[in-house]
């Protein structure tokens, strides 16, 4: 159940970012964001897998 809530929150945040970008409130590109934050994404996924097993 906890992983469902976290997954849902991630989708809501990503959707909100895309919506704000489409409405012109932010000026971001997905490629630039991924190139900057890919190490953090790997860390978060790894931590999620680590705590999911316990």
Image (cartoon, grey):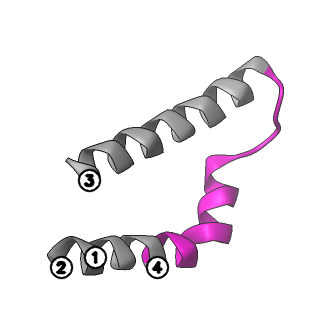
Q: Main secondary structure of the magenta part?
A: helix
Name the side, left or right, on which 15 lies relative to 24: left
Image coordinates of residue 37 in percent, x first then y, are 62, 68
SS class, disc 3: helix
Q: Which residue is most to the top?
A: 23
SS class, disc 2: loop
Task: Report if the CB atoms under discs 2 and 1 are less than 8 Å apart.
Answer: yes
Q: Which residue is mark 3?
A: 3
Q: CA distance from mark 2 to mark 1?
A: 5 Å
Q: CA distance from mark 3 to mark 2?
A: 13 Å
Image coordinates of residue 3 in percent, x first then y, are 26, 53
Q: Is-magenta flag for residue 34?
A: yes
Marks 4 and 3, the one that precedes in the sequence: 3
How many residues crowd around disc 4 within 10 Å: few (fewer than 14), some, or many (20 or more)?
few
Which mark lies nearer to you, 2 or 4? 2
Q: Which mark is residue 54?
A: 2
Marks 4 and 1, the one that precedes in the sequence: 4
Image coordinates of residue 19 in percent, x first then y, are 64, 24
Location of the C terminus (image quadrant)? bottom left
Task: Report if the CB atoms under discs 3 and 1 are less than 8 Å apart.
Answer: no
Q: Does 26 appear above or below 42?
A: above
Task: Report if the CB atoms under discs 4 and 3 are less than 8 Å apart.
Answer: no
Name the side, left or right, on which 9 lies relative to 5: right
Which mark lies nearer to you, 3 or 2? 2
The residue lying at 69 percent from left, 58 percent from top is 32
Marks 2 and 4, the one that precedes in the sequence: 4
Image coordinates of residue 35 in percent, x first then y, are 63, 68
Q: Which residue is mark 4?
A: 43
Q: Which residue is mark 1?
A: 51
The residue lying at 37 percent from left, 78 percent from top is 47
The residue lying at 55 percent from left, 79 percent from top is 39
Name the side, left or right, on which 27 lies relative to 22: right
């Amino acid at each position: 159940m906890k992983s469902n809530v976290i997954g849902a929150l991630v989708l809501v945040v990503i959707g909100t970012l895309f919506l704000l970008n489409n409405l012109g409130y932010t000026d971001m590109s997905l490629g630039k964001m991924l190139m900057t934050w890919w190490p953090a994404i790997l860390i978060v996924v790894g931590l999620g897998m680590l705590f999911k097993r316990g």
